[in-house]
Amino acid sequence: MLEILSLVAIGLALYTLNASRNSAQKLGEEVMRLKREVEALKAEGVTAPVGTTAAETAEAAPEEAAEEPAPADFASPWPTAQATGTDEAGKGRSIFGGGPAVPAEAAVASEGADEAVATASAVPVVAAKPKESFESRIGARWAVWVGGIALALGGIFMVKYSIEAGLLSPAVRLSLAAVFGLVLMAVGEFVRRRTLPVIANAFQNAMIPGVLTAAGAITLFAVTYVSYEFYGYFGPLTAFVLLAAVSFATIGLSLLHGQALAGLGLLASLVTPALVATEEPSAWGLFGFLSVAWLATFAAARIRRWQVVPALANAGMALWAVLYLSEASTVAVVPLLFAMLVLALGHGLIWPGSITAEDVPPATGAASADPLDRLLAPPAVAVSLTGALTLTFPALVLANAVPALSRADYGFAAIVMALAVLGALRGWAIYPALFSAIAAVVGVGAMVVGPGGLLFDDVSILAPPALDDTAALPLPVPVIAVVPVDLLLLLAVAYAAVGLAAVRLRMAGSSAFAALWSLIAPAVPFAILALSFLNFGNLSFDLKHGLLAVALGLVFFCAAEAFSRGRAEEGGLFVPQWALASGGFAFLVLALHAMTDGLATTLGIAFLGAAAVFSTRLRRWPVLPWLMAGAAAVVAGRIGWEPTIVGAANLSKTPVFNPLLAGYGIPAALLALSAFELRRWPEERIRNLLQALASLFLLLTAAILVRHGMNGGVLDSSVPTLGEQSIYTLLVIGASAVLMSLDLKSPSPVFRYGSMVVGGLSVLSILSAHFVGLNPYFTGELLGKWPFIDLLLIGYLLPGIAYGGLAFHARGRRPMPYVIMLALTGVALAFAWVTLSVRRYWHGEGIANWKGFLQPETYTYSVVWLLLGVLLLAVGSKADSKSIRLASAGLVLIAVVKVFLIDMANLEGILRALSFIGLGAVLIGIGLFYQKILSGKSGTGEKAELNAKA
C-alpha cells in the first residue's frame, strides 16, 4: 500500500501546484486590471481618488433616477417589462441585493457619453465583479440549503413519529413517505419552471428547485432502503434496481438543477452496492453497475462541462476497486479490468474527450503562460488527474498480487497500456502519460522484487527420504514461482510503440508534450527490460533479452533519425533527438550485457561510444559525442563493480600483458581518440570532458598494472607497501607534468586545472602515506640489502627529485602558491631521505622506532641537516628560487634547534663540542655567503638584491 500512498501524495502535490499557479495568475490579473483602471482615469484627466469618484457616482445615480417618471401600478404581482420600463432581471436584482436596474431611456441617453469616454480612453476599463453582500448570502443561499435539509429531516421525523405512535401501518407510512418525496421533486420542477432567470444565474449553488429535488431524492432513496432492510418488502434484486433507478434519476435531473444534485446521485449510486447484500455476490454485477453509474455521471459532466463531480466519480471507482482487490474473499480480475477499461475509454471519448484549450479558455489567462505551465494545467485538469490515479491504484495492487492472483499480471499490463494509449491520443492527457510510466516501472518492480512477486515466492514443505524407521523431518524448500517474463517483454515492446506514436502525434501540437513522451518512450521499456534481465535472465548469455534490446535500440535510433529530419541546422535543444538517441544507445549497452560477458562487454561498450563519436561525420547531432561520455561512465561503473574485469579466478598473473591492460587501456585509448576526433567540434565542453576522462583512465591503467605486478598477480584490498605507493606517486607526478605539457600545446581548462588538481592530490598522498602511514620508521618495513638502491630511493629521493623538476617546469606557468607547494614538497622528501639514510647507516635495513637513537647517530643528523641546508642555499641561489632558499633557512633553523635542545642534553664529550663548533662554523659561513654573494659590491656600487625574483 506504500505505492498507493505515494501516488496519492503525488496527486495532491500536483493539484496543489495547479491551484497555487491559478491563484498567482488571478492576483496578477487583478493587479493588471487595477493598473488599466488607473491609466484610464489618467487619460480622462481625473485626479480624484477612485473611492471619491465611486462615491460621487453613487450619489448622482438616485438623483437621475428621481427625474424619471414613476412606473404605473398593476394588479399582477409579476409586472411586465413593457409597462414598467424594467426587465425581470432588473427586478430580481433589486430583490436579491443587486444593483438597481438602469431604465431604458437612461441607457440610451448614456450611450453617447459612454462612447466619448471609450474614445478618450486608450485602455479599456474592466468592471470588477461586485462582492456579494452578507444579507444576500444569508437570505438567498444559506436559507435555501437549511430549508432543504429541514424538509428532508421533516419527512424522516414524520415517519419516525408515525412509527412510534403506531398511527399507520409500515406499508402506509412508507407509501406516504414515497409520495412526499415525489411531491418534493414535482414542486422543485414547478418552481424551476417559474423561477426568474436572474435567480438561476446569480445563485446557481443555492437554487430552490435543486434543493427541493435533492430532498425528494433523499426521501425516495431512504424509503426504498428501509423497505428492503427493515421490513423486507423488497428482495435484494428489486431493492438494488429501485435504488439504482433513484440514483440515475437524480443524475439525470442534475442536468436541470446543477452539479450539486449530480454529486448526490453519484453518492447514491456508489453506496447502493454496499447497502444491498446478496448470498451470491457477483463481481460482474458490481462493476457493471458502477461502470454504468460512472458513464451516466460523465455524460452529464460532458454536457455541463463539470469537473468536481467527475473527479469524485473517479475517486469512488478507485475506492471500490482497491477495496475489492484487498478485501474480497474471491477476486475476479476480468470484471475489474472491464470497469477500468471503460473508465479509460470514457475519459478519451466522453469527458474530457476531444476537448482542447481553445474549447475551454481558462478564466485566469493561462494562455500567456509558458509551455510547461500549459502542459501541467490542461483543460479539465481535475478530471484527468483523478482519472489517471484511479487507473494507477488498481494496477499497482494487481502487480503486487502477482503471481498469487490469477490473471493479475495481464490485468496490470492492460491497465498500464490503457493509460499509455490515453496519454498518447489526447493532448490534455499529461497525467495519464506520466502515471502510466510510474505504474509500469513501479508495478514491474513490485512483480520481480516485491513481497508478492519474489522469484522464490512460495515455501513448500517437502519431506526427504528417511534412512531408518524414524519419521522424516520436513524441510522448507523454496519453489520457483511462475514469472510472466514473456508478458513483461511484450509490455516493453507495446509501450515503446505507443510512446513513439505519441511523439509523432504530439510533435505538431505541443512540443513540450512531445518532449515528455520522447523521454518516457525509451525510459519505461528500458526499465522493464533491465528488471526482467537482471531478475530472470541468464547474466552470462541471454539471447532473448539481448536480441530484443538490439531491436529496440535500432528502432529508437531510427526514430531519432526520422524526427530529426529537417531540424539538423536549427538552433536550440531538440529534446526528442537527445532522448531517443540516448535511449537507443542504452538498449544497445543492455544488449552487450545480455549477450557478452567480462572483458568483451567492457570493450564493446567503449567501442560503441567511440562509434557514436565517429558517427558525427554522418550526422551532426549534438547528442552523439555525449554518448561516449555515457559509455565511459558505464565502463567506470563496471570497473568499480569488478576491478579485475574478468573475475579474480580468471585473471592472469603475468605482469603488464594481462586482461587488465586491455580492460583499462583500450577504453583510455578510445577516449583519447574520441577527444582528438572532436578537435574541431563546436562545443568545447564535451571535448574537455573526454580529455579529462582519457587522462583518468590512463592513470587507472598504470596504477592497476602496478598493483597487479607488485602483489604477485592478485588484486585484493590489502594495504599497499611503500614501494607500491611510491610508484603511484610517481605516476601522479608524471600525469601532472603531462597535463601541463598538453595545456601548453593545446590550451584547455581540463588540462590547466586538472594538472593542478592532480598535483594537489599527490601532495596530500605524500603527507598521509609517505610521511605517516607507510613510513618504514613507524611500520618497521625492511629497506633492502643494498645501502643506496633501496626502498628509501624509490619512496623519498625519486619523488623529491620529481617534485623539484615539476616545480621548475611550472615556474611562470602556474600560480606561485602552487609552485611553492611543489618545491617545498620536494625539499621535505629530500630531507626525509637524508634523515632515514642516516638512520639506515647506523641501524641497517631495519630502522624501526623501537631501536632508539645512538649518540653518533644524533650527531650525524646535525651535520647532515646543516650540509643539506647549505646545499639547498647554493641551489636556490643558482636557480634564483626564493622558495628553495627559504627551505634551506628552515633546515638550518631545525638544525640550530636540535643542537641547542637535543645535542646539548644527549651528547657528551667531544661529540657535544664538535656539534656546537660545526654549527657555529656553518652559520658563519652562511652569513659570509649572504654578505659577499647576495649583498656584496659589484664595481660601481651595491648589487641589486637577487631575492626579488622567485
Image (cartoon, rainbow, N blue to C red):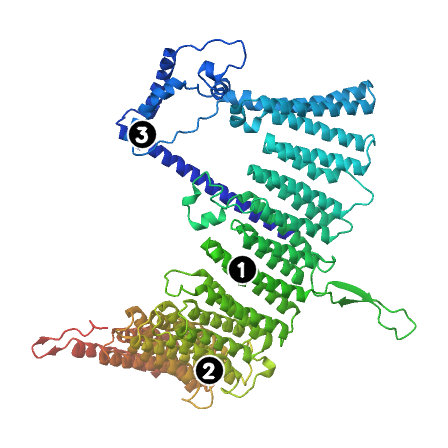
Q: Are marks 3 and 1 in contact (CB under 8 Å)?
A: no
Compared across the picture, whether 71 is left or right of 526 comes to left
Label 3 or label 2, whichever comes before in sequence order: 3
Give amino acid for label 3. Ala
Residue 376 in percent (x, y) is at: 49, 48
Up/down of 137 relative to 647, above or below: above
Quarter occupied by residue 41: top left
Q: Position of residue 324 (x, y in %)?
A: 72, 47
Image quarter of residue 181: top right
In this figure, which residue is indicated by the disc labeled 3? 118
Residue 559 at what x, y percent from top left? 50, 66
Which residue is at a point 48% across and 82% down the rendered structure image?
Answer: 706
Of callouts 3 and 1, the N-terminal one = 3
Query: If the image is split into quadrants, where does the C terminus sit?
Result: bottom left
Mark 1 highlights which residue?
501
Q: Vertical placement of 817 versus 504: above or below?
A: below
- Amino acid at pointer 1: Ala
Q: Which numbered disc covers residue 723?
A: 2
